[in-house]
């Protein structure tokens, strides 16, 4: 089983392994056959996840092969010197061509991530492409986490939009919650559509990090299944 997933390696050296994770597989924590770290361990290979992507998300995931490499890489994530780009298909269309979602997150009932403010307090500026909440509207009775996602929209029609999402902060479920709360949830996202069928249209597309003094950029091309709602010939931005 692990050998099959290892065939999806995008980059590897003595310190790191970067995989193109398929949908339906957890990075770690499930302790069974859908847990990449456990499968690797069962095959005799120790891997340390440097970051996480959700089970329903496909694409680039970075592992360290030893604790020294893991520490150096996690410090880059903590200092926000790592660049991440995700692809999402959302519904409906009608987004500006680019924008910034600056909405703090909190954790509500049943450990659910949500915006740390009432929905009606979200201020949207469709011309500037910004979504934010005034400071006085942010909840003060719970712990809140500043969260910023930058958006680009290379294609859209009335039903769907293809979004490039660059999370400037790395909060749990950040992109999924941000897009849903501005009225454009990710297609087939079970967090917000309990009747969702088919794959969740969120894909970790690109990751850039520093390794041995060099900048490394790794990309995972989206699958035909992911791009099914998007017309042929749409060009992804650089």
Image: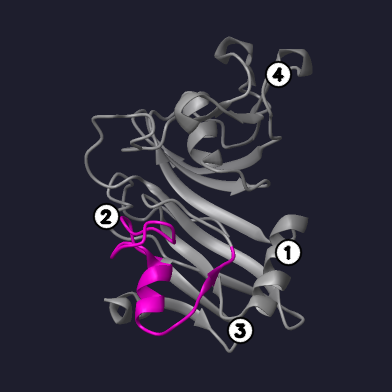
Kindly identify which residue carries mark 4.
138
The residue drawn where x is 32% and y is 61% is 223
| Helix, strand or loop status at disc 2 | loop
Q: Nearer the viewer, mark 2 or mark 4?
A: 4
The residue nearer to you, when weighing 55 against 157, is 55
Counting from the top left corner in percent of width and height, residue 24 is at: 30, 55
Instruction: Give coordinates of residue 137: x percent, y percent.
Output: 71, 13
In the image: residue 103, left or right of residue 26: right
At horizontal 68% and vertical 18% (from top left) the residue drawn is 139
Marks 2 and 3 sit apart, C-alpha to C-alpha, by 32 Å
Q: Which residue is mark 3?
A: 15
Q: Which residue is mark 1?
A: 76
Image coordinates for residue 83, horizontal then vertical, percent: 66, 59
Residue 124's image quarter? Answer: top right
Mark 1 neighbour density, 10 Å: few (under 14) some (14–19) many (20 or more): some
Residue sitting at x 77%, y 18%: 135
Residue 218 within the magenta-colored segment of the rendering: no
Q: Earlier in the sequence, mark 1 or mark 2?
A: 1
Q: Is residue 232 depicted above or below 121 in this figure?
A: below
Classify mark 4: residues with Cα within 10 Å, few (<14), some (14-19) or many (20+): many
How many other residues sit within 10 Å of disc 2, few (<14), some (14-19) or many (≥20)? few
Which badge, 1 or 4, is on the more N-terminal residue?
1
Q: What separation in Å lies between label 1 and label 4 (alpha carbons)?
A: 29 Å
Q: Secondary structure at mark 4?
A: loop
Q: Mark 2 — residue?
A: 225
Residue stretch rendered in magenta on the structure: 21-50
Pointer 2 or 3: first along the chain: 3
């Amino acid at each position: 089983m692990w050998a099959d997933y290892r065939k999806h390696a995008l980059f590897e050296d003595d310190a790191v392994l970067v995989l193109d994770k398929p949908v339906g597989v957890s990075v770690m924590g499930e302790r069974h056959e859908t847990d990449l770290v456990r499968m690797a361990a069962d095959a005799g290979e120790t891997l340390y996840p440097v970051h996480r992507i959700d089970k329903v998300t496909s694409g680039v995931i970075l592992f360290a092969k030893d604790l020294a490499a893991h520490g150096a890489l996690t410090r880059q994530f903590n200092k926000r010197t790592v660049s991440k780009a995700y692809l999402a298909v959302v519904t409906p269309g009608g987004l500006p061509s680019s924008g910034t979602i600056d909405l703090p997150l909190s954790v509500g009932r049943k450990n659910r991530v949500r915006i740390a403010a009432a929905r009606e307090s979200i201020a949207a500026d469709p011309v500037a492409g910004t979504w934010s909440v005034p400071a006085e509207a942010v909840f003060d009775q719970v712990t809140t986490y500043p969260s910023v996602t930058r958006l680009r929209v290379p294609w859209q029609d009335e039903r769907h939009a293809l979004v490039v999402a660059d999370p400037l902060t790395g909060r749990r479920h950040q992109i999924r919650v941000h897009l849903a709360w501005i009225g454009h949830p990710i297609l087939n996202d079970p967090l917000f559509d309990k009747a969702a069928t088919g794959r969740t249209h969120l894909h970790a597309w690109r990751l850039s990090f520093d390794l041995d003094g060099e900048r490394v950029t790794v990309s995972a091309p989206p699958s035909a299944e992911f791009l099914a709602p998007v017309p042929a010939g749409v060009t992804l931005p650089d």
